Amino acid sequence: MLNEDIVRTKMSKQLGFVEIPVVNGGVDLQQGVGQQTSFKQLGFDCKGSNYRPDGWYLPKDTNEVAIVCEAKSSDKDIKDNDKQISKYIAVVKTKYKNVIGIIYNGVDVNVYKNSLSLSLALANELHNKEFYFKKVNENEQIDKPKIYSLTKNINDILHSQLNIKNLYHRMIFTATSIVAIYFDNDGYLKTLKNIPSYDVFRQTISNFLKKRFERDNERLEKIQVLLEVFNSISPNIDNNEAIKKCIENLCEISDCAKLSSDNWKGEDVMGIFFNEFNRYKGKSESGQVFTPDHITSFICKLLEVNSHDVVLDATCGSGAFLTKAMAEMIKQVEYDETKIKKIKKTQIYGIEFDKEIFALACANMLIHNDGKSGLINGDSRTTEMERWIKAKPISKVLMNPPFENKFGCLQIVLNVLNNVKEGTKCAFILPDKKLEKASKNQRKHLLQHNRIEKIIKLPTNIFKQNTETSIFIITAGVPQNDKDIYTCYIEDDGLETLKNQGRHDINNKWRDELETYWLDFIDKNTIKEDISAWIKPSEHLSFQTKQPEFEIFEEDFRKTIFEYYCFQNGIDVKKYKEELVEKVLFGSIIKKENNKSIVEIDDEILQSSKHCGEKIDTSTWKEFVVGDIFDCQTTQAMISPKDGNYNYVSRSAFNNGVSRYVDLQDRNGENFELNKGNCITIGAEGRIAFYQKDVFIAGVKVYTIRHIKLNEKIALFLCSLLNVNATKYKYTEARILDKIKKETIPLPTAQQGEPDWQFMEDYITSLPYGDKI
């Protein structure tokens, strides 16, 4: 039998607790075991603070996981002590968000997260504390909309307020800062919000990183690459307030990044960050097209990447494939620290030609607690890089090379295939017809030395440029021998485009259904009409889309004849079409028949539209400051709405600002107050003013303008003026609330010098459709 003292000692050793003297109310990390130390001595002042735990791990940061333990002799049944550990957990929960409770008798162990038992299938084994931290974080849900919002805030501040115009400089500034704040365990950098200048902030970050990794040569090498670009970035404007806001957003992202890909089974924080930033630019000067997260994950699963693989991406960009593969491999080793270190150090290899993008890849790896992976700044088209690849024991290749010929797309693919060992499974994302359009010699070489196993055509809208692409699964070193190729078409991935947020799996269609469906479909070489087929490599090297039946209509002939007739008579068809559309638009009337809206040309309206080009005389109007006349406010923003029946007014410049219809409760179950309507709304990016008659729910950065005199007609008059004002803003410049308040607009003026509200209403009534409002 093991007595309680022996169990306590064994527990301390297994958990990896290091004895640290207890200081009353101390702020340093407190961990250890004992019988005499009370929670009060450990800094708790609450009900139950006189309890004396047998073990404790209490980090300085109360957002981190705390551990509290109860030890029993080996002859005691640990199930009898559930109530005691629950009391301990309740005390620690008064300070910490997440608490691990452990009952141990030297043989059996029960583990709790907060008040719930964790089903860990641990076979009664007590693990090191790091294991429990990771198990807790596995179940943490990252707030993706928050990461998107924070990243956009940072981009806007760097671009608009600090005038850093280069997108990759903005990305590197952000990534370097996050790396620094992430590794700042003492929270020193988070206190720099009142830093005197940008240069001081930059120098502080640089000095911190050099000192932090001065004894870690492998990581220091990548830090120096990152800092070389980081220190070259200089804003055109030194704005302390902007720097402060930027640091606040950086700190929030860094806090989220604590849940790295080691811990989280899905898309990691840095993956979200890079994908969000990459939306602002479809392609770099070196031709990189960044791969969406769900596609990198899908390809890892297609190739069955496992913990024994050695993975290469010879055009790695910011490292999306490498971090995803690393995460998949780490999941399979059950948190074996020795195996994890081996994966990071010897099983991940990447090459990137563009030095700035390479710096981003270094940052991405560092934030994944890795600086030891085989990243190299080089050109995969060169003999030097061919030798580099050949020297590595590569077993899987995951790549999305630059598509254009000028960047050597096929040369890179062939270089990789020629220099990995026979039988290596490779996946390349390429334009559909890339291999078919290759030269005769390239196709011959490819098929004589390699085998194209499968071609999976991806949805058209995967990439921003709507390039038609496919995944080409190729086995290196094995000749085709005219073996048929399996092809299929994933026509839809279930993702939806959100205004200003890119494409997202908002309904979890891909995660919960489509990914599994397609992995099984492709694995079994399923044949389904129009979706999949076998092709002969001597005939095609791409998925063959079924061609629609030939159809032609009389209007096709009319169009051809009319355009030729216009050409003969010197008429610019494009200009004529624009003028005609405008005349018809302003010369039409809308009627309701059988609950349907019908548009008809109205001669009277058509005649009146001739005056549309006449300038309004505003010489007797008076200038007013918007903020002096109107009540201008920021709306309460709903960030992650569910579908429902209420108008969702966003920053859209179309459909009266209504981008969708939503529920009053968001996806997190939080209720939002309805905006009461009868107001003008302006979205920051959309900049266009709209009148909202009815109640509505607002998105991020939507502002309201109200006045006691406001009604539909007066509001439409004012919207016209405010929209003319919007032309003062540059396309990339946000129309923030402070700017709106300071705008001046001329208004028709009554005798008393006040705005003439009646004139506004009467003028709108006099125009076509105005009397129908």
Image (spheres, rainbow, N blue to C red):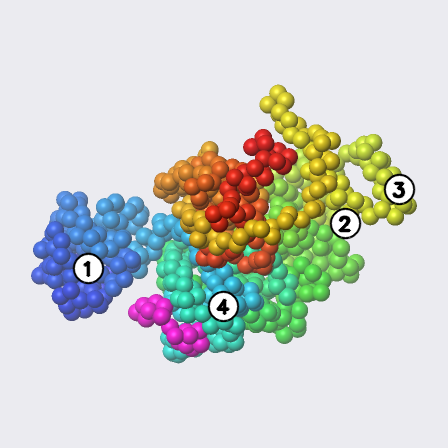
Quarter of the image containing the C terminus? top right
| Residue farthest to the right, as pictured | 568
Report, in whole angstroms, how far the alpha carbon at label 3 lies from the one at label 1.
88 Å
Q: Mark 3 belongs to which amino acid?
A: Tyr
Tell me which numbered mark, 2 or 4, is placed earlier along the sequence. 4
- Residue 763 image offset from top left, x and y in percent: 59, 39
Q: Is residue 195 magenta?
A: yes
**Foreground label between 2 and 3:** 3
The image shows residue 628 at horizontal and vertical percentages of 44, 53
Left or right: residue 626 versus residue 1 is right
On screen, residue 524 versus residue 265, left or right, reads right
First of labels 1, 2 by sequence position: 1
Q: Amino acid at mark 4?
A: Leu
Which of discs 4 and 1 lies nearer the camera? The answer is 4
Real-space CA distance between mark 4 and mark 1, rounded to the nearest whole angstrom:
46 Å
Specify the quadrant that holds the N terminus: bottom left
Residue displayed at 15% across by 62% down: 42
Q: Callout 2: few (<14), some (14-19), or many (20+) C-alpha neighbours within 10 Å?
A: few
Q: Which mark is residue 56?
A: 1
- To which quarter of the image does residue 258 belong? bottom left
Which region shows up in magenta? 183-204
Q: Estimate the spatial distance between the alpha carbons at disc 2 and disc 3, rounded to whole Å.
A: 46 Å
Q: Which mark is residue 162?
A: 4
Dot 3 or dot 1, earlier in sequence:
1
The kind of secondary structure element at disc 1 is strand
In this figure, which residue is indicated by the disc labeled 2?
Answer: 538
Residue under circle 3?
A: 565
Residue 432 falls within the magenta-colored stretch = no
Sooner in the amino-acid sequence: mark 4 or mark 1: 1
Q: Please tell me which residue is depicted at 70% across the width and 46% down the height of the picture.
A: 613
Which mark is in front, 2 or 4? 4
